[in-house]
Each structure stands twice: as C-alpha cells, then as structure tokens.
Image (cartoon, rainbow, N blue to C red):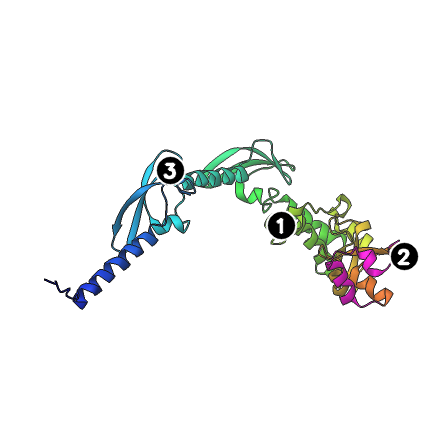
Amino acid sequence: MMHQHHAEPDHRQQLRGLVMADEKSITKRRSIKVGDKFGRLTALSFCERRGSHYYWCVKCDCGEERIVLHSALTGGHTKSCGCLNREMSGQRLKRFKDTFSINAGDRFGKLVAMSLHERRGRNKAYWSFQCDCGNVTVAAMSEVKYGKTQSCGCLRIEISGNINRSHSMSKSSEYHSWCSINGRCANLMDKAYPQYGGRGITVCERWRKFEAFYADMGPRPVGTSIDRINNDGPYSPENCRWASRTQQARNTRRNINVTLDGKIVCLKEASQILGLPYGTVSARVRRGWTPERALGISK
C-alpha cells in the first residue's frame, strides 16, 4: 500500500524559514570566537541573548571577568573591565600635576617661589613669591606658570615708565611688532606660542629692549611685517627683516629653497629668475628630482 506524502502547510514552511533565518542571524552575530582579543579583554564564552542583543563572557588582563555586549567588543567601545580608563585618568592627573607643580626656588620672571600659601577649591593653589624688587606677593600658581604674572606689579610700572620716558612710540606699528614677537616667544597664554616659543624660537637678549629693536630694524615700511630669514632661527638683527606678504609667503617651512648666485631663494622665485615654468619644475621635484636638477643648475 502506497503512502501519500501530504504537502506541509504554508504556515509551517514560513515558521521553519523564520527559525532558520534566526539561527543564521545568531551565527552571524556570534562571529566572535573563544580566545579572541579585544584590547585587554579575552573572549571566554557566549553568555546569553537579550532580545536583539548578544552578550559574551570575557576576562581582562588584570584578572577581572565581565559580561560585555557583542557590539561593544567588535566596535572597539569596550577594551577592558574599566582598569584601562582608571590608568589613563591617573596618567592625565599626573601630567596635570607635573605641568602645574612648582618648587620653592623656581623663578618666573622677577618672581622666586617661596612656599605654598593656601589652596582654594580642588585645583586652585596660591604661592608666596619674592620679587626682585624686594616685595613679597601672593599669586595663583597657574597664572605664574603661564606667564600672566611675572612680578609683584613693579614690572608693569617699570615698563610703563620706560615707555613714557624713552621713546613715546607705544602706539607705533614698530612697537606693536616688538610686543608681538616677545609675546609669541615667551607668553604661554599667547595663541601663537606653540608655533614659536613652543618650537624653541626665542628673542635675542639685545631685543628685550624696544630701543635696541628699533635701532636695528628701523621704521617699518608700509605693507611689511617682521620676518625671520631662517624660520628655525631666533628673532635677532642678523636673522630678521621687514618683508612683504609675498616675500613671507616664499619664506615658510613648507617652501623648498635653493642657492642661486650665492643667494638663497625659494623654488618659485628661482624658476622666475631662470625663466622656467614653475609647474614643470615643481612636477620634476614631486617625481623625485633634486631642486637643482629640476632647475637645470646641478653640476
């Protein structure tokens, strides 16, 4: 007797399809393997599923075990049991303390640190300082470290008095240039300090006084500003000039300089002097030619 095979109802086929799809989804979402590393975490075993989320048991290098969301591991959002964040916070705090810590005897301008005076809040510390003029003053440690406070107040009076007595040029463009170069080389609060003082650029000792600066540089021509010939050198008489924007644009750290007839010029200016298309010369340099070869002046 032959048995008839009855076709499976459509709803059962649909249900089976959903189950198989769900199993495939679980397999896909469990793409983590036992022993896989995620930062300091090592996968131990699949833990559970909560709705559409999958969780794994992991062990941290420090020995702690945690249950972590699958996507947090694969996405790089969780890399430890929490010990990594604590260590990084500790390092940041140490850098903060190293940055703002001072010791008795440290000098800041005309001030010499004497002792801690008081603390206000968690991070506001005030120190007693001996000024070179003989006065003792109390100032915030952060303001002294950043160069905002450099004396008991006598320095401001001294500078103001010297300005009024000596040159009467406090509103001139030359004086403004002098203030700018001293600020970006010595004042940590100056927005340009990282590109100048922070890079080791200094102002020579002679130019600490405006009169000497003006005597060396002379009146500033219209349309110019102060420019260092050697971008890695200091602000000094032998390394500075009044230069136009065009001249300064050709004298940056990004420019390629060559020596032409005993004079150092940028690649573009050398191309113009020799009557060569700058685009052609620049393309040769990008292909690996030396600047001299690209200009046709190599020996």
Q: How far is disc 1 from disc 2 in space, using C-alphas?
A: 35 Å
- Kindly tell me whether residue 181 is visible in this rendering: yes
| Residue segment shown in magenta | 276-299
Please name the residue shown 20% across and 62% down the image: 15
- Which residue, given by chain and number where applicable, does mark 2 sit on? 261
- Which residue, given by chain and number where applicable, does mark 1 sit on? 194
Residue 290 included in the magenta stretch of the image: yes
Residues under numbered marks 1 and 3 in contact, where contact means CB atoms less than 8 Å apart: no
Label located before the other in sequence (1 or 2): 1
- Mark 1 secondary-structure assignment: helix
Left or right for 190, reference 86: right
Left or right for 154, reference 85: right
Identity, as a three-letter code, of the amino acid under mark 3:
Cys
- Which residue, given by chain and number where applicable, does mark 3 sit on? 60
Above/below status of 266 relative to 79:
below
Label located before the other in sequence (1 or 3): 3
Splitting the image into 4 quarters, where does residue 136 fall? Answer: top right
